[in-house]
Each structure stands twice: as structure tokens, then as C-alpha cells.
Amino acid sequence: MGLFGNGVVGTALGRAPRERVQSPCQPPRALCLALESAPQSRVSRDRESVHPSGQRVPWTGEGPLGWGLGLVCPILCALFPEPPVTSPLSRSSVAEADQYHLAWWVLPADLLTPVQAFRALRASGHEGALLESVEGVMRLARYSFVAVDPRARLRARAGSVTMTEGGQETTRRGTALEALRAALKSHAVPKAPPGLPPLVGGWLGFFGHEWVTELEPRIKRPDADPFGTPDASFELFRDVLAFDHATQRLYLITACPRGSSDHGQAQKTLAALAEDLFTDAGDFKGFELLDDGPVHGTSKAAFTEAVDTLRQAIGAGEVFQAVLSQGFSRRFSGDPFTLYRVLRLVNPAPHMFYWSSGGTTLIGSSPERLVSLRDGQCLSVPIAGTRPRGDTPAEDELLGIELMTDPKERSEHDMLVDLARNDLGRVARVGSVRVREHAVLEKFPRVQHLVSRVESRLAAGRDALDLAAACFPAGTVSGAPKVRALELVAELEGRCRGPYAGAFGYFDGSGAAELAITIRTLVVQNDTVHWQAGAGIVWESNPDLEYAETMHKARALAEAVSMAARPAFQPPVAQAQGARP
């Protein structure tokens, strides 16, 4: 199953309360209120009357005033339509607010997609993240989750923790692990009741690669830091929209911390969300590239030289394997969401996400889960061993067979499976770690990989944060032994990786966690989009082939960035004028 089960939208914390903008095709509210306050002695209300446009028409005619309003109101509704007021298929009760500390509506979702919902919410003043998931070969996962309006934000970097809540920002000394654990306790999130989707709120965000310098002080942070992002950045969401693609239903969910006392306000929140979902998103911004091609952060000669250096370290017994990466970038103007729209088409993956906060946008299509925890069951899914997809079915099959029978690839994969077992074993119940699937060939849109699944039961007294810390970063983006491999890679790459090779996901109110590795991920800051790809280096490595592997892995991202400037992804006006190809 895909990590996210599909989709999340969030908003910037601390923005001013949104003012509803009067649509140019809507009658003024004052006119509507004036009509509703007309003398009742001459007019009768028909509370069940609904105009064919979908709008409630509260007036029927008795006498000149009633006759006139009965004629005018339908005309106004036709000429100045308001956004549709959605009526739920069902809704939670006051008793359920007391029992679960949640309120929810259920709406039909056959006319709305997660991407449409994201655009509509953003047009209504919301900002944040969208997550989607494709399982196996092009099969949509069951759920998409849309989390709206974060109530708090936590950022940690190099021993400093900043919490933003209620417009107040406080900074203190501390670690990301300590701060997140305290936040999970002090900002409790309700558990999902039976019958609702599994995510009804929680802390959503990412761990940057340099979080490892907190977990393993021996590893030093490189001086060069082109991104300047936090080691951990998470936001608290209490309002969630969940798409159930199997039943074509949309769940609007909000927290009721005080139970039934919050039920009335919760209903207003859900009604406002429903209205915003059906807001006209309007035209979107175009997207234009400002350069002639990707800028490589590393030359081929420098990369292959670094491979040789790692092979020498392997020969000397310092490490068995290390993951070396290289970066790329391009400059652009326009809406970075266009990049997500393209990436989900050219490289659908189990863990797709669009998340924007603090001047950094992450746009991901990761194939790999770092770790998940649900009901005490831990799962890690190491991916190691890569071949491109073939141009024909026959070539594709031959490449897959070649991968499965390559001694170098099998050796590397087995090494990383053992590392995943050891990582889980640090926080697992004794004797519970086992490999459920080993070196299975899985095909993705652009590459094919060897994939294993390692599971365990969480030990008593341990939690989701302990699990994340034990497994971070994944061996598939670091090496083995992990600490020494990371020291060598930091020295050879010469700069912080930032979000790349970290983890993106959530911690929820049930104690569950879902984290994907931030590979096949675009990082947008200002007018530049960055991406990075790596290859596992072992003694048998051929430097030229390892360089080619990084290029294969980066190809989908490079193509998505180029394709975003094509006319098909531009606003209608730009398409008509012929946007830059």
C-alpha cells in the first residue's frame, strides 16, 4: 500500500483571517439580507424551495411584494450565482463529538479530485501540501488526505527549536526529537474512530538529511549549505479532508477538543470548508524556464573521481557501501504547482506530495518508504538495485532479469536489507524482526528496482519518534556502516543535502507514523528548482555506470521540469498565444 494513501493540503500558519471576496457575478450580500428581512405579513417562506441552479429560493408570492420578490429572486440567482452550498450525505452527531472529540461531514466526491480541491482551497486563501499515492503499477491508492490550516508550527535546526502558535513565536535550545515528543504530548490529536479514514489530524512535515548530525554527533554538518532549511519542520493539523476513492466519498473532519461544547463551531468550520472546496479556482499562473538547461552541481569527472575515492575506502575496510549523489538546478518563473501537476503524470509513485512552508516547497514522487508504524507494527521497505525501463516489453524483461541476476546488485541489496533489520532491531520487540519479502523486482514508470520488506513489533516503552530516529537516514541513501559512510559522503559531496535523502510524512493521534524517503523530490526556493540523485558505491562499482545510474534516476525530474513549460500546462490564454515549448 502507498505510504500516504493519497493527498494533503495545508495552509500557512499565522495568516490573517481570510475575508471572503465578493464575486463580480454575485449580488451584494446587503441585497440578499434586505430581501430576507422584508415584511413577513405580505410574504410567506417556503423553506424547502430550491431553484434549479441549486440555490435555495426563500420567497413565494402573496400580494405585490411577494409576487415581485418571487419573480426577482430566481432571476438574480440565474444572473448572479453564488458558490453552491453543499449539503452532506451524512454528518456526525453531538454524542459522537463527546465520544471521539471530532465532527465530520460526508460528501459525494465524484465531481472533485484532490488536485481540484487543492487549487480551490488555495484560491480561497489556503496554502500548504498535497499528497497522492499510486500503488504497484499505476493503481491509485484508496485514500487522499487534505489537511487544512495548521494550528502550530515547529522548526528545529542545530540545537535551536522555534515554535509558532497563535501568532506567537518562541525560540529555545533543544533537539528536534525532544521538541517533537513534547509537542505530540501537549497538542493531542484525536484517534480515527471506526468507519473513518485512518488520518484525522496530526503533525505533518519533513526531516532534513542533516537531522542525522543531531542523532549522531560524530557526523559533522558541512559548512556549505545552499538550502538553509530546518533539520525538522512539522505543522499541526486538526482539520482534514479525506478522499475515499473506493466509495467516491469525501470526509470533512475537524477536531472538537471540548467535545459537544465545540460541536456548533465545528459545524460552521465544516460548512466553510465545503463552500471553499467549490470556489472557482480561476486561472492559474504560467510557468517559464529562464535558462537553457539543467546546471550540474558536479562534473562527470569529479563524480567518477569521488567513486574511486570511495572504492579505496571500501578496499581499506572503512565501509562496505556508500551512497554518493549529485545535484541539479534550473531557474524559472511562475507557479511551482505546475511542476507537481507534471511530475504526477510522468513519474507516479507510492509517495507523492506537494508541501510549501517557510519559503521552501517540496514536490515529491518518492518510490521508497523509510518506515511506518501502525498498531505496533513497524515496516521498512529498502530499495536497492536499479535498471532503466526498456523501450519494448522484451527489452524491459531482459533488463529486469539482468538486475535480478547481477551479483553486484544482489550483494548491495542484501547488505542494505541487513542494515534495515539492524535499524528496526534497535527499537523492536526481541525476536520480532523478519524479512517478509526479499529482493522482489518492482517496476516504476522510469526505472525498475529490487525491493524488500522488513517488519517488526515495536518494543514496550518505545514510540514512533524512537522508530524514526533508529532508522534515519535510510541505509539506501547513506551506506553501511552508516555513520562512517555518512562521514565520507559529506566530505566528498562537500555541502549539506537539505531535504534530499531525509524523510517526509506525518505522526498522528493514534501513535502511528508514515515517513517516505525524500528522493525523486524537487526543492523550490525563490526562482530556482533543485533536485538530486544518488548511486550506491561498492567495491565492484564501475564509476561510469554509477554516474549513469544517477542520471537515470534524475531523468524523470529533469523531464518534469522541462515539460512544465509546455503549452499544455499553461493557462488557457497562454495556450492560445503559444507558450514557450
Image: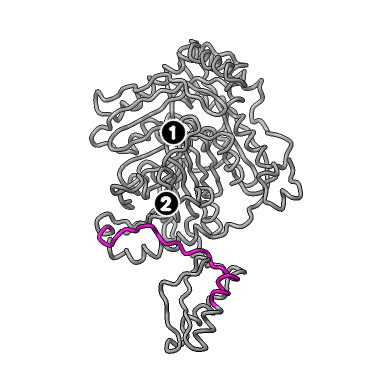
Which of the two residues, 410 or 423, is positioned nearer the viewer here? Answer: 410
Which of the two residues, 438 or 174, is positioned nearer the viewer here? Answer: 438
Q: Are marks 1 and 2 in contact (CB under 8 Å)?
A: no
Q: Residue at x 45, y 39 (%)?
A: 504
Residue 221 in sight here:
no
Locate the N terminus by quadrant. top left
Image quadrant in which you'd find residue 497: top right
How far separated are the C-alphas under marks 1 and 2? 38 Å
Callout 2 secondary element:
strand
Callout 1 secondary element:
helix
Which percent across, then down, holds residue 52?
Answer: 51, 66
Which of the two residues, 364 or 251, is positioned nearer the viewer here? Answer: 251
**Relative side of 347 to 167, left or right:** right
Relative vertical location of residue 48 with respect to residue 266 in this rendering, above or below: below
Kind of residue at badge 1: Val
Residue identifier under label 2: 250
Locate the C terminus by quadrant. top right
Residue 148 in sight here:
yes
Which of pointers 1 and 2 lies earlier in the amino acid sequence? 1
**Relative side of 278 to 470, left or right:** right
User: Magenta residues?
Assistant: 73-96
Q: Is residue 77 magenta?
A: yes
Kind of residue at badge 2: Leu
Q: Nearer the viewer, mark 1 or mark 2?
A: 2
Residue identifier under label 1: 212
Q: Residue at x 27, y 57 (%)?
A: 96
Which of the two residues, 172 or 32, is positioned nearer the viewer here? Answer: 32
Relative vertical location of residue 453 with respect to residue 4 in this rendering, above or below: above
